[in-house]
Amino acid sequence: MTVSENSWQLRVVHSTGYHYASPATQSYNEARLTPRSDRTQNVLATRIETTPATRAYRYTDYWGTEVTSFDLHAPHTEFTVLATSVVETAAAAEPIREATWKDLRSEAVIDEHTEYLQPTKYTPRDRELASVAQALRKGRGPADTVLAIAKWVHDQLTYRPGSTGVHSTATDAWRAREGVCQDYAHVTLVMLRSIGIPARYVSGYLHTRPSAALGETVAGESHAWVDVWTGGWWAYDPTNAMPVGPRHVWVATGRDYADVAPLKGIFTGGAGSTPEVAVQLTRLA
């Protein structure tokens, strides 16, 4: 992928720090913090470092996400994970309109994408949302229905940090009519899957300043959006009601948030700690 005026080169620095009131004796962790190269982005450099240092193992999980696992067996009261990447992103792509509703009902499509059509803990069946999805589908093809549903979710929910948590489901957010990007994505997934459109959860980052100067570092955001299949995969950001474009960096995909949590693990000893997370994005080109 060549860099053009419609693409960006971004450096992403994601830091997660833990502080324990008493020493933790062991910790085991998995990090999903490494962007992947695909049709929309090209990863130029990436690394994950920990303090204290650990021995890391990398593998690709079932959903295609690169996972770095590491464990620490020495007593420690602080633990930091620092992920740094440089990524070339692409201009926003047009929706793919190849599949018809008949195509989406075919055994071949259902068989290939069945895991992105089923309800999950975070995206359970919801009659009210399914009814709205059916109404929005009328007179529209699959791709235009995706856009209509994403816009509807954007209009119905109020973005309010702290109103939901990492364990909140799509139904929780819908009842509250508020949430954050995770909730917008989950509600959209429930609606799309209810009418037979394969859809998956995407986690990554969003550069928050479209007019950023080269070399300018901004406080970025961990972000979430949806990837849909309507004859091919394409992405849309329901939180901002916009196509996924040069300011988006994708890291992981799955059925819902549970498949893509950036950092999860267990520790023994120590006292509970709330992680301190900071994301910085710099436009390099």
Image (tube, grey):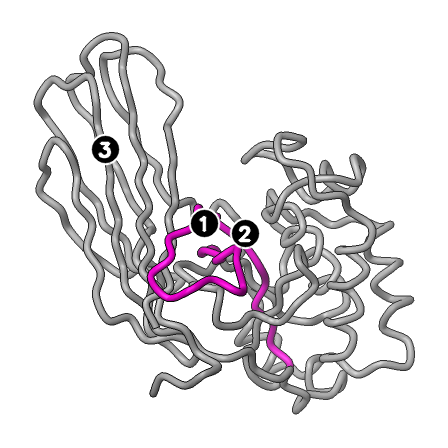
Q: Which residue is mark 2?
A: 256
Span highlighted in magenta in the image: 203-230
| 33 sits left or right of 93 in the view | left
Per the model, the C-alpha gap separating discs 3 and 2 is: 26 Å
Which is nearer the N-term, disc 2 or disc 1? 1
Per the model, the C-alpha gap separating discs 2 and 1 is: 22 Å
Q: Are marks 2 and 1 in contact (CB under 8 Å)?
A: no
User: Who's the residue at 80% across and 69% down the image?
Assistant: 148
> x, y (%) of residue 26?
17, 23
Q: Residue furthest top?
A: 22
Q: Which residue is mark 1?
A: 220
Q: Residues within 10 Å of mark 1 (few under 14, many from 20)?
A: some
User: Who's the residue at 25% across and 53% down the image?
Assistant: 84
Which is nearer the N-term, disc 3 or disc 1? 3
> x, y (%) of residue 144?
77, 79
177 falls in the magenta region: no
Q: Secondary structure at mark 3?
A: strand
Instruction: Judge whether 82 appears above or below 98 on screen.
Output: above
Per the model, the C-alpha gap separating discs 3 and 1 is: 19 Å
Q: Which residue is mark 3?
A: 80
Mark 3 or mark 2: which is in front?
3
Q: Secondary structure at mark 1?
A: loop
Amino acid on which the number 1 mark rests in the picture: Gly
Q: Quadrant of the C terminus?
A: bottom left
Amino acid on which the number 2 mark rests in the picture: Asp
| 125 sits left or right of 15 in the view | right
Mark 2 or mark 1: which is in front?
1
Instruction: Judge whether 3 appears above or below 238 on screen.
Output: below
